[in-house]
Image (tube, helix red, strand yellow):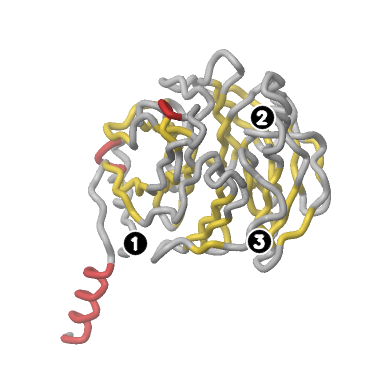
Amino acid sequence: MRCLSIILIYVLCSVKGYAEGTWTETTGLPIDLWAAPQAVGNGKIYYIGGQSDLSGTNFLTWDGSGSWTVKTKPPYSVYIGAGGFVSNKFCVAGGCWDSFQGNTNFQIWDGTNWTWGPKLLEGRKVASGVTWSNRLYLIGGFYTDNNATTNVQYWDGALWNSGPKLPYAIGMNAGTVFRNDICIIGSDGTSGTNFLILQGGTNWISGPTPVYNSGGWSALVTNNQDRLLLLGNNNGKVYSYDGTNWTQTNNTLYSHNEMYGAVNYSGNVFAIGGHITNVEYLATPVTNKNIYLYGVKINKLYGVPINKIYGRGQ
């Protein structure tokens, strides 16, 4: 009993708790990054590219404890590209750097080295990258700044293929998988409230309009498949979709911030990086390198009886 008590005390002291309904700062990025593709795989968060040191090739991983690990840079910039995992390999597609056009580059990290994969079917930037059924889907986005697309392409581990077209052109967008369907939210050029669902990987349908115009800059992430969270830009508000309706939660992220990443990792939702919107046009963007943990007790906000989310002690 004495040994059990000692073990219990150790566990309780080594696990850091997070306040309900708030965002709590945790381990920061070693460098400022924004508009960087991110994904979760092989037990880690992967975060790559972004605009920080004017290279767009920064590659970082985090296992939920300690500091972020700086990894080997990819051969070419993946700024405003898309990322995801296929067959346990981290893949990054498209992006732009040396021009305003989205490129056709496809780069693959096997855990040790970067290799070039086959070119995309067409150039793409600010598309969402979503892994579904062991495929990396590249959805919407732009080829040039004024050329949003309805096209969807996916990598099956061997080739790039054409997927189901969007019902209308979507430029900047964020995507994830919710209850086994791909979901995206983004801008058609006039509104950022477009919410589309790819049912069964075959047909796009329109979902209910979110209560907030995301402008295409928001992050979309699942919370244990129970809720879909929309992290709105500029006002720091967080919105929840339960499969039927969107509602605003009673908490905020950090205001005047956009183009950050969001992942669900180890039972927690993380918002990563980003930049301050009111200074985004400066030559050296002022960025936010903090990472925030969404430590929310869901049954308090939504009436759903599931457990409170905890962050790992640092």
- Disc 2/disc 1 C-alpha distance (Å): 35 Å
What residue would you read off at disc 1?
Answer: 312
Q: Secondary structure at mark 3?
A: loop
Amino acid type assigned to the residue bearing label 1 in the image: Arg
Amino acid type assigned to the residue bearing label 3 in the image: Asn
- Disc 1/disc 3 C-alpha distance (Å): 24 Å
Location of the N terminus by quadrant is: bottom left
Dot 1 or dot 3, earlier in sequence: 3
What residue would you read off at disc 3?
Answer: 88
Q: Is residue 216 above or below residue 295?
A: above
Q: Secondary structure at mark 2?
A: loop
Amino acid type assigned to the residue bearing label 2 in the image: Gly
Dot 2 or dot 1, earlier in sequence: 2
What residue would you read off at disc 2?
Answer: 141
Report if the CB atoms under discs 1 and 3 are less than 8 Å apart: no
- Disc 3/disc 2 C-alpha distance (Å): 25 Å
Q: Foreground residue, 220 or 118?
A: 118
